[in-house]
Image (spheres, rainbow, N blue to C red):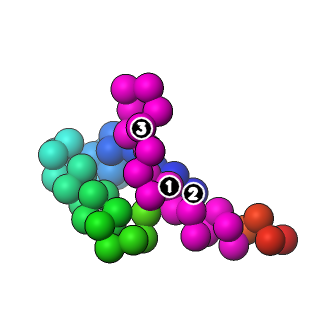
Amino acid sequence: MYTRINYIEVRCGVTRQTAATYLNSLVDVGLLDFEKVGREAIYKNTRLIDLLSKF
């Protein structure tokens, strides 16, 4: 339902900059929403959250 840059770094084996680029590209096309929580950037899949909340 959400991810962080660090999660993508580790799971995909890419640099922090590359992970941020991937996630920001998904934000740009509307697949994820960006939220700043403290010092951390959170990327949320709000469409999935909305869908699951209907059940």
Horizontal and vertical percent position of residue 46: 56, 62
Horizontal and vertical percent position of residue 45: 52, 62
| Residues in magenta, as a range | 33-51
C-alpha separation, residue under disc 2 versus residue under disc 3:
15 Å
Note whether 8 is above or below 54 in the view shown: above
Which residue is disc 1 drawn over? Answer: 44
* Horizontal side of residue 39 vs 49, given as left or right: left
Quarter holding the C terminus is bottom right
Horizontal and vertical percent position of residue 53: 76, 64
- State which quadrant residue 22 falls in: bottom left
What crowding class fits label 2: few (fewer than 14 Cα within 10 Å), some (14-19), or many (20 or more)? few
Judge depth for marks 2 and 3 and give the one in front. 3
Q: Amino acid at mark 1?
A: Lys
Q: Amino acid at mark 2?
A: Met
Note whether 10 is above or below 54 in the view shown: above
Q: Amino acid at mark 3?
A: Lys
Quarter holding the N terminus is bottom right
- Queried whether the magenta region covers residue 9, the answer comes back as no
Instruction: Mark 1 and mark 2 in contact? Answer it, CB < 8 Å.
Output: yes
- Queried whether the magenta region covers residue 35, the answer comes back as yes
Q: Which mark is residue 1?
A: 2
Q: Earlier in the sequence, mark 1 or mark 2?
A: 2
Q: Earlier in the sequence, mark 1 or mark 3?
A: 3
Which residue is disc 3 drawn over? Answer: 36
* Horizontal side of residue 33 vs 17, given as left or right: right
Q: Which mark is residue 32?
A: none
